[in-house]
């Protein structure tokens, strides 16, 4: 309906073999709808730590957001999501405002749909995503990574679980270790694991060589994704005294 400048655009994205379903919809009432929110949902603490986030566009008219979620199947009533923000209210390349929607008390093994709609005077744009909680599990990185020399060619690597993972005893984590070093100008890396313990002794390393260590965490049964890697720790194995 171009006479009154009403334009609707819908894009459906479905990944075969996946539960993921994205529906992007823009509806303009004056020919200039807001940008479709770029939403990312993650469960940082299974099962009650799900957060959906999206950035405020760098150039945008005053915009407000409406967020709802519901079970995909059945006749469940959509629930409103409490929206909060963080970061700068005047986005810049170095600091952008982020919006957040916390989804409490989601059911296990249940398909959900979330709808984030941006609204301003030019119209509205919506992002709809279908997901199952178990597919978006991604813990925060392990913390307090420590590396200490043992015998002449051994190192003990220790770490602590991410403090945001609230249910360690009910839903344990497993871990992977990434360590790397330089050899004649080339970077060599080794990925070990998974381990259920929070420490491991590495043997047969080279004295005098500089190593870098990082750890990631994943739900024990393999739900979702491994965390981002922890902050790197650099260690040089001491040489034996003559």
Image: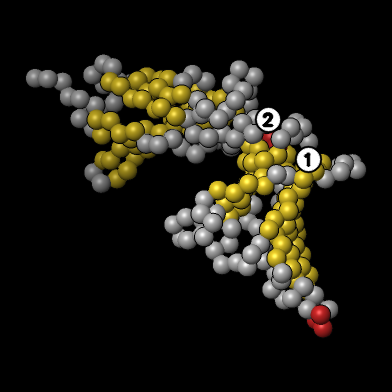
Depth check: give the residue in front, 119 or 147: 119
- The x, y position of residue 186, in whole percent, is 29, 45
Q: Mark 1 or mark 2, which is nearer the start of the sequence? A: 2
Quarter of the image where one finds residue 171 = top right
Q: What residue is pinned by disc 1?
A: 111
**Distance from the alpha carbon under mark 2 to that under mark 1:** 14 Å
- The x, y position of residue 49, in whole percent, is 64, 34
The N terminus lies in quadrant? bottom right
| Image side of residue 82 versus residue 95, left or right | right
Depth check: give the residue in front, 180 or 77: 77
In this view, the residue farthest toward the right is 75
Q: Secondary structure at mark 1?
A: strand
Mark 1 is surrounded, within 10 Å at the Cα level, by few (under 14), some (14 to 19) or many (20 or more) other residues, namely some
Vertical side of 172 occupied by 14: above or below:
below
Quarter of the image where one finds residue 189 = top left
x 33%, y 25%: residue = 147
x 25%, y 46%: residue = 185
Q: What residue is pinned by disc 2?
A: 47
| Image side of residue 224 versus residue 212, left or right | right
Viewer-side label of 2, 1: 2
The C terminus lies in quadrant? top left
Whether residue 35 is visible here, answered yes or no, is no
- The x, y position of residue 12, in whole percent, is 75, 59
Q: Secondary structure at mark 2?
A: loop
In this view, the residue farthest toward the bottom is 3
Depth check: give the residue in front, 189 or 241: 241
| Image side of residue 180 versus residue 174, left or right | left
């Amino acid at each position: 309906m171009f006479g009154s400048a009403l334009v609707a655009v819908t894009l459906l994205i479905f990944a075969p073999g996946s539960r993921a379903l994205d529906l992007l919809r823009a509806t303009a009432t004056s020919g200039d709808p807001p940008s479709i929110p770029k939403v990312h949902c993650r469960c940082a603490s299974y099962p009650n730590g799900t957060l959906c986030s999206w950035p405020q566009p760098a150039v945008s008219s005053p915009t407000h957001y409406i967020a709802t979620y519901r079970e995909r199947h059945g006749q469940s009533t959509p629930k409103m999501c409490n929206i909060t923000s963080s970061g700068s209210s005047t986005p810049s390349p170095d600091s952008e405002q982020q919006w957040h929607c916390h989804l409490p008390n989601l059911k296990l093994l249940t398909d959900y749909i979330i709808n984030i709609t941006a609204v301003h005077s030019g119209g509205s744009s919506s992002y709809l995503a279908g997901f199952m909680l178990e597919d978006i599990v991604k813990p925060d990185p392990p913390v307090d990574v420590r590396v200490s020399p043992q015998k002449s060619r051994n190192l003990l690597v220790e770490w602590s679980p991410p403090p945001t993972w609230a249910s360690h005893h009910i839903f344990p984590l497993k871990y992977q270790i990434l360590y790397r070093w330089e050899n004649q100008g080339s970077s060599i890396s080794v990925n070990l694991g998974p381990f259920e313990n929070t420490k491991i002794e590495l043997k047969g390393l080279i004295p005098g060589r500089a190593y870098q260590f990082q750890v990631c965490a994943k739900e024990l049964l393999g739900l979702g994704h491994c965390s981002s890697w922890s902050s790197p720790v650099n260690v040089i194995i001491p040489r034996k005294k003559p």
